[in-house]
Amino acid sequence: MVMNKVEICGLDTSKLPLITQTRSRELLLRIKSGDEPAREDFIRGNLRLVLSVIQRFSSRGELMDDLFQVGCIGLIKAIDNFDLSHNVRFSTYAVPMIIGEVRRHLRDNNALRVSRSIRDTAYHALQTRARLLEELGREPGIGDIAKAMEIKEEEVVFALDAIQDPVSLFEPIYHDDGDAIYVMDQVKDDSTNDEDWLTHVAIENGMDNLTEREQRILRLRFFNGRTQMEVAEEIGISQAQVSRLEKNALKRMRKYV
């Protein structure tokens, strides 16, 4: 089902209820005491939150109905695990839980496979992060997560990196009235670039305009790292002549580089 339709999973998204912070806390207190109607009201009051989260994954080619249902599972898990004693808004705690549930669904149905042990470590890390966020009242660092899990920081980083969602090179990242900018437009190889390539072409062009002796001197000096004395001995001329020929050759090269 496409995102521009109002209805998703049989619900009219324009009529989803809004829930205030005060009402949210009131319902959560009733939920903790086992009030099932309050639980149903709270779930309905947070369906807009689920909808806003799954919109991040609208370009993945998945049915939005399916993602919405998976997101609702994440919402329910967040409700079951939320601790009112910590000064954290429910939405702050729930969003990572919903995202984690959606990502788990996408990974389990992805052609790119990650080993079960790495996935388990990653899921445990995400759960630990959510718990620490609630306990600490701040975003926990990798060190906090690793310490709580009693594993090395490198293992946490590796596991979380391994389950990152793949991104198409043709996925648009910006679009205005002109042409879209895609991920591939932002990717480059720092080991080489257009400027280096143009410089190389200019040097080759400049070398072609030198005499054979001048080319040999410059190649020995700047490509092979020889000293002027070593070049003089190899060519059979004086060091002063090498210096003069080199200077004149470089002067002519500057016209092309």
Image: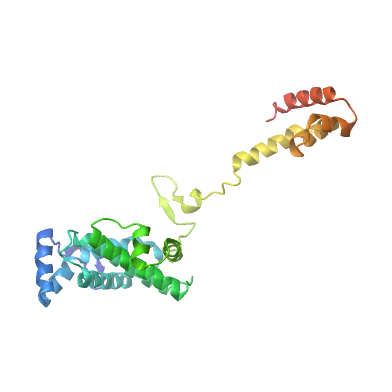
Which percent across, then down, holds residue 135?
23, 62
Which percent across, then down, holds residue 92?
23, 59
Q: Which residue lies at the image location 23% right of the left edge and 69% below the top edge?
A: 78
Which percent across, then down, holds residue 172?
43, 54
**In this image, 228 relative to 26: left or right?**
right
Looking at the image, residue 230 lies above or below residue 165: above
Of the 4 image quadrants, the one containing the N terminus is bottom left
Question: In terms of image quadrants, where is residue 144?
Answer: bottom left
Of the 4 image quadrants, the one containing the C terminus is top right
Depth check: 196 or 121 in front?
Answer: 121
Which percent across, then down, holds residue 213?
85, 31
Q: Which residue lies at the image location 27% right of the left edge and 65% below the top edge?
A: 131
Residue sitting farthest toward the right: 236
**In this image, 224 relative to 117: left or right?**
right
Looking at the image, residue 235 lies above or below residue 163: above
**In this image, 125 relative to 241: left or right?**
left
